[in-house]
Image (tube, rainbow, N blue to C red):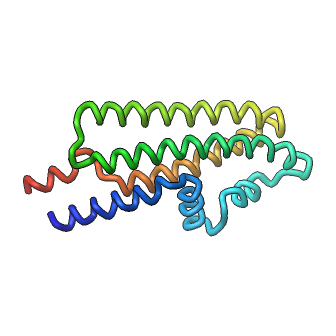
Amino acid sequence: MKKLSLILIMAIATFSVNAQSSFKEDVEVLQSIYGKSKSDLVKQYMNLSDEQSVAFTKVYDNYETQRKALGQTKFQLINDYAANYATLTDAKADELAKGTLKNHIAYEKLYEKTYGQAKKAIGAINAAKFIQLEVYLQTIIRSEILEAIPFIGELDKTKVQ
């Protein structure tokens, strides 16, 4: 039990630090996996001509601005969950679940909007290539986050054993 309590305390501390900057978290996760920044990874993968690169950069920069805002919201939700984990009520669980679902939907809408903009700028194949990469990268980041967050009631189960 002491081990699990210590893990929860460390997780809460980690959540607090990570909530300060979603961009920093994204960079750290991607750099730890791929050894390069996200923008470098995207640039290398997309492998666009100079003309396409100029057109795509405008779309990508706009996307990143909006994605970072969604990332901040995501980490605020994680921080709120961590702060309330031990005393989670139905009302707080409902608030967090609705906030998380709303955040996921906002990401999906952003992908759709960005795909349309990228398609106009660099064609459908390259736009699809970017969305595929972005969804993949965000899935890796989401997976890393989920691995660090205890399930609701997870620690309560250890009390029974």
**Quadrant hosting residue 60:** top right
Position of 101 with respect to 151 (left or right) is: right
User: Which residue is situated farthest in the left direction here?
Assistant: 160
Total number of numbered discs in the rendering: 0
Percent coordinates x, y for residue 109 in the rendering: 60, 30
Percent coordinates x, y for residue 106 in the rendering: 55, 32
Residue that appears at 43% across and 37% down: 100
Residue that appears at 60% across and 65% down: 31
| Vertical relation: 52 (above or below) 159 | above
Residue that appears at 39% across and 49% down: 79
Q: Which quadrant: the C terminus? A: bottom left
Percent coordinates x, y for residue 42 in the rendering: 71, 54
**Quadrant hosting residue 55:** top right
Percent coordinates x, y for residue 94 in the rendering: 31, 31
Position of 103 with respect to 109 (left or right) is: left
Q: Nearer the viewer, residue 6 or 141?
A: 6
Position of 130 with respect to 31 (left or right) is: right
Residue that appears at 21% across and 62% down: 5
Q: Which quadrant: the N terminus? A: bottom left
| Vertical relation: 61 (above or below) 100 | below
